[in-house]
Amino acid sequence: MGAGRSEPDYPVLWDIACPDRPSRVPGVAMAGFRDRGVTPPALRLIPHPTVTLVLVVGGAIDVRDGGGRRQRGSFATGVGFGDVLRAERVDGFEALQVRLSPVVAHAVLGTTDLGDTAVALDDLWGREAARVSGRLGDLPTWADRFAWVDEWLARRVEEAAPAAPEVSWAWRRIAATRGAVRVEQLAAEVGWSRKRLWSRFQAQVGLPPKRAARLVRFDHAVHHLVAGGDVAGVAADTGYVDQSHLHRDVVSFTGLTPTAVVGEPFLAVDDIAWGRPGPRNARRNS
């Protein structure tokens, strides 16, 4: 990791590294994180419309779900996992995070049925999980790690059966419209019945299309809130009926009110790691 930007006025949680170029696999984004020893305990993980892999390179991350189950080490989370996951403890961790479009995730993971918890990569991949983490630990730079993971992901995607074209189309439409498309319209566009689209989409993405659209819309709205938008204005600009409608969705996905969610550190790093517009609470290194 090279020279970073000048120190900001607010607490810095992590150093962040980003690849110099997009992944060769459409629907894949990566970022590297290094703990600076100031991560708050029980850090809330905010749902977002991707499947996430956290590949631990060094140190430790302990994650706890709403049922009290704990997971240490590399893990995956499903799309929109809900207000249940906390980074209970971090100990000098260094990790590479991969965000996968749901229509790519099945090929990479072998499943999208991850539920609302963190699933150990050992349980999904067996010995392959340890091999991946070990290989990343041997590589000296983030650039080397990003390149290796990108090639490894490309091989997994090439060797796996793709998602149904109709499901891929429906997901892309939901993402492109930021959730402002009805399931009936999607079904008509792909030539399926509403019931068939619902069933196939659920099986391959991990949640039904209506909830997927809600999640994408929420994700768009919550980052506008973090960027400083007022609740009424954000509700109007992101397709909500009114302010109370936005309030209900934010509480549903995070357990927090719109006013409270803007202070969540997990959201504050997104502008650097994933190109989000919000305030910075981390430092990027090229």
Image (cartoon, rainbow, N blue to C red):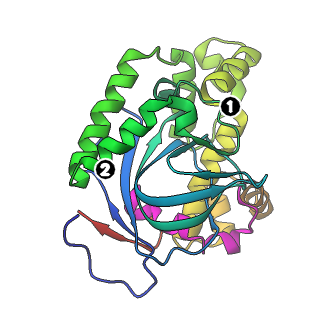
Crowding at dot 2, Cα within 10 Å, few <14 / some 14-19 / many 20+, comes out as: some
Task: Point out residue 157 in the picture as x, y percentages from the top left corner.
Answer: 39, 23
Q: Residue at x 31, y 46 (%)?
A: 136
Q: Is residue 271 magenta?
A: yes
Is 209 placed left or right of 168 in the picture? right
Crowding at dot 1, Cα within 10 Å, few <14 / some 14-19 / many 20+, comes out as: many
Q: Residue at x 65, y 40 (%)?
A: 213
The residues colored magenta run 253-276
Q: Where 117 sits versus 154, above or below?
A: below
Q: Where 70 sits versus 134, above or below?
A: below
Q: Can see residue 25?
A: no
Task: Point out residue 203 in the picture as x, y percentages from the top left corner.
Answer: 66, 22
Cα distance, mark 1 to mark 2?
38 Å
Q: Secondary structure at mark 2?
A: helix
Q: Can see residue 257?
A: yes
Residue type marked 1: Pro
Q: Nearer the viewer, mark 1 or mark 2?
A: 2
Task: Point out residue 268 in the picture as x, y percentages from the top left corner.
Answer: 50, 69
Q: What residue sits right under mark 2 in the picture? A: 137
Q: Nearer the viewer, residue 237 or 20?
A: 20
Q: The C terminus is located in which quarter?
A: bottom left
- Whichever of labels 1 and 2 marks the residue nearer the N terminus, that label is 2
Q: Nearer the viewer, residue 258 or 71?
A: 71
Q: Is residue 112 magenta?
A: no
Q: Residue at x 74, y 67 (%)?
A: 256
Task: Point out residue 285 in the picture as x, y percentages from the top left corner.
Answer: 27, 66
Q: What residue sits right under mark 1 in the picture? A: 209
Residue type marked 2: Gly
